[in-house]
Every structure is written in C-alpha cells, then in structure tokens.
Image (tube, rainbow, N blue to C red):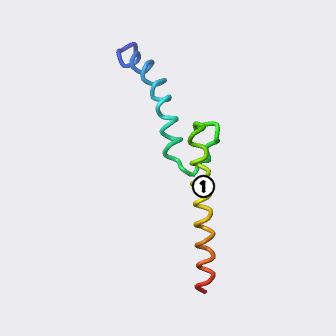
Amino acid sequence: MDGPGTYLALIAVPIDVLFFIPLIICRLDFIPIPDAVYPKWARPIRHANEQTVKDSEAWLRAYRRRQR
C-alpha cells in the first residue's frame, strides 16, 4: 500500500486541515468568535455592528408592541 496516493495524502491532509479550520470559522456565523481573533482595527467595527443589530431588534420589538 505504498503507492503515490499515500505520499500525496501525507502532504495534502495537513494542508487541508489548515484550510478547513478557517473555512468553518468564517462560514458558521452563529459560533461566537473571540475578539483576540480579530485585528485591532476591526474590533470597533465589529462592536458597532453588534450594537446596530441590538438597536434594530429593540426597535422592531417596540414597533410590534405598538401594532397590537
């Protein structure tokens, strides 16, 4: 079982794992990612976006309450 596929797998599997982990992190938005992963310049933008989402959800709840 020492064909060329074995040697290719020895090289490809670690590379695949290295590329698969960031893919999962980027695609699964519902997994909270710690601030340490983000660069310093992106953290305020992330917090502003989170605050905007919270504000819009609060507005929508208040709007729905007024509609009843």
Q: Is residue 7 left or right of residue 37?
A: left
Q: Is residue 18 left or right of residue 52?
A: left
Instruction: Measuring from the top left, give residue 61's x and y in whole percent.
Output: 62, 74
Give the answer, above or below, for where 10 lies relative to 36.
above
Instruction: Measuring from the top left, give residue 8's x and y in whole percent.
Output: 39, 19
State which quarter of the image contains the C terminus.
bottom right
Q: Residue drawn 58% across and 60% down?
A: 52
Q: Residue drawn 61% across and 46% down?
A: 44
Using the image as rendered, state which of residue 18 and residue 64 is in the foreground: 64
Instruction: Measuring from the top left, give residue 9's x and y in whole percent.
Output: 42, 21
Q: Quadrant of residue 54?
A: bottom right
Give the residue furthest to the bottom: 68
- Crowding around mark 1 (Cα neighbors within 10 Å: few <14, some 14 to 19, many 20+) is few
Using the image as rendered, state which of residue 43 and residue 28 is in the foreground: 43
Give the answer, above or below, for where 16 lies relative to 4.
below
Give the residue furthest to the left: 4
- Helix, strand or loop under label 1: helix
Identify the amino acid type marked 1: Glu
Give the answer, above or below, for where 67 lies relative to 12.
below
Give the answer, above or below, for where 39 lies relative to 57.
above
Q: Is residue 24 left or right of residue 65?
A: left
Q: Quadrant of residue 36?
A: top right
Give the residue furthest to the top: 2
State which quarter of the image contains the N terminus.
top left
Q: Residue drawn 57% across and 48% down?
A: 45
Q: Residue drawn 64% across and 41% down?
A: 35
Using the image as rendered, state which of residue 63 and residue 32 is in the foreground: 63
Instruction: Measuring from the top left, give residue 30's x and y in whole percent.
Output: 57, 51
Q: How many callouts does the rendering have?
A: 1
Q: Pointer 1: what residue?
A: 50
